[in-house]
Image (tube, rainbow, N blue to C red):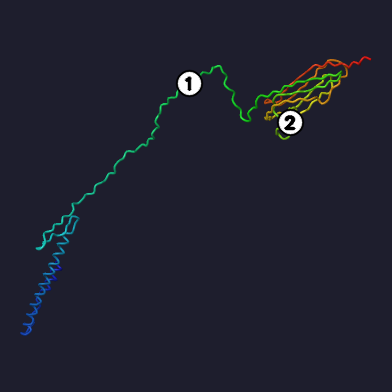
């Protein structure tokens, strides 16, 4: 209890001065008695309140304080125990070793396949490398022959051809020439010479070329020269027939020759 509170309680219960006079003294005595009783009750109540506050303040200070223990005659004793203080502890996170991820390798399956030893001759030349582009056509070849018919100084000639060739290409367009039903017209050019210095005959393929030819045809044909030939004098002459046709490597030739012996017709005897 503080000094200020004690002083206030002392002033409260202090007797007031007694008034003078008989009637007043009796009344004052009665009033003073009532005041003392009231003051005593107020003091007791104030002291009790101060004590309760002091005890509560003393018990509830600090982190380990607990509520006061009270007893009641009609209830069993109740004891409240505060939980023991827990000191903070540092928690160390678990250390996990770094995990190295490994990729499982596929199982190795033994093979029962065996490699046969090579039986090739070591002296065999390796195959030639293939070239890009249009594959080379099958081998082509043309055969020619001639069949003369002599009548005095006049000779008629039949020309024959057979085999396979590549159809020529038109120079101006670069396209394959249309296939002709006359087999001889599918060659690049033809020529024949009577062997007496006269103008040769035949067909010139000036508008065609064998460059880029790739279409292969096979067949045969025959036909006479453009016209019979008449020699000026008797003698032996060499007739030459040449055909130039297209193959995988360009222009190729086929030649046929025959010897001709001519003489004037004899006049019938009279």
Establish if 165 lies above or below 14. Answer: above
- Quadrant position of residue 264: top right
Picture coordinates of residue 129, whole percent (x, y) = 59, 25
- Decide which of tag 1 and tag 2 comes sooner along the chain: 1
Picture coordinates of residue 27, whole percent (x, y) = 7, 82
Left or right: where 178 falls relative to 8: right
Establish if 32 lies above or below 211. Answer: below
Left or right: where 213 falls relative to 41: right
Q: Nearer the viewer, residue 190 or 64?
A: 190
Establish if 229 lies above or below 5. Answer: above
Distance Cα–Cα, label 1 vs label 2: 55 Å
Which mark is in front, 1 or 2?
Answer: 2
Picture coordinates of residue 180, whole percent (x, y) = 74, 31
Q: Residue tagged by mark 1? A: 116
Q: Residue tagged by mark 2? A: 181
Left or right: where 198 falls relative to 43: right
Q: Quadrant of the C terminus?
A: top right
Residue placed farthest to the top in the image? 269
Q: Nearer the viewer, residue 29 or 230?
A: 230
Could you tell me which secondary element the residue under label 1 belongs to?
loop
């Amino acid at each position: 209890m503080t000094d200020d509170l004690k002083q206030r309680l002392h002033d409260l219960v202090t007797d007031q001065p007694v008034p003078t006079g008989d009637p007043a003294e009796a009344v004052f005595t009665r009033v003073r008695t009532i005041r003392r009783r009231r003051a005593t009750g107020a003091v007791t109540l104030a002291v009790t309140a101060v004590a309760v506050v002091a005890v509560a303040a003393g018990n509830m200070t600090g982190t380990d304080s607990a509520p006061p223990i009270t007893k009641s005659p009609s209830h069993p004793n109740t004891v409240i125990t505060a939980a023991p203080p827990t000191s903070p502890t540092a928690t160390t996170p678990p250390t996990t070793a770094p995990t190295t991820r490994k990729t499982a390798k596929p199982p190795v399956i033994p093979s029962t396949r065996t490699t046969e030893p090579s039986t090739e001759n070591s002296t065999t030349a390796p195959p030639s490398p293939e070239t890009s582009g249009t594959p080379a056509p099958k081998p082509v070849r043309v055969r020619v022959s001639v069949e003369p018919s002599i009548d005095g100084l006049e000779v008629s000639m039949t020309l024959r051809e057979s085999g396979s060739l590549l159809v020529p290409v038109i120079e101006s367009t670069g396209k394959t020439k249309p296939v002709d039903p006359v087999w001889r017209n599918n060659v690049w050019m033809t020529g024949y010479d009577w062997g007496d210095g006269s103008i040769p005959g035949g067909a010139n393929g000036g508008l065609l070329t064998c460059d880029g030819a790739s279409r292969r045809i096979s067949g045969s044909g025959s036909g006479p020269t453009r016209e019979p030939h008449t020699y000026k004098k008797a003698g032996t002459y060499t007739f030459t027939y040449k055909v130039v046709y297209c193959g995988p490597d360009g222009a190729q030739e086929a030649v046929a020759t025959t010897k001709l012996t001519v003489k004037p017709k004899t006049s019938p005897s009279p």
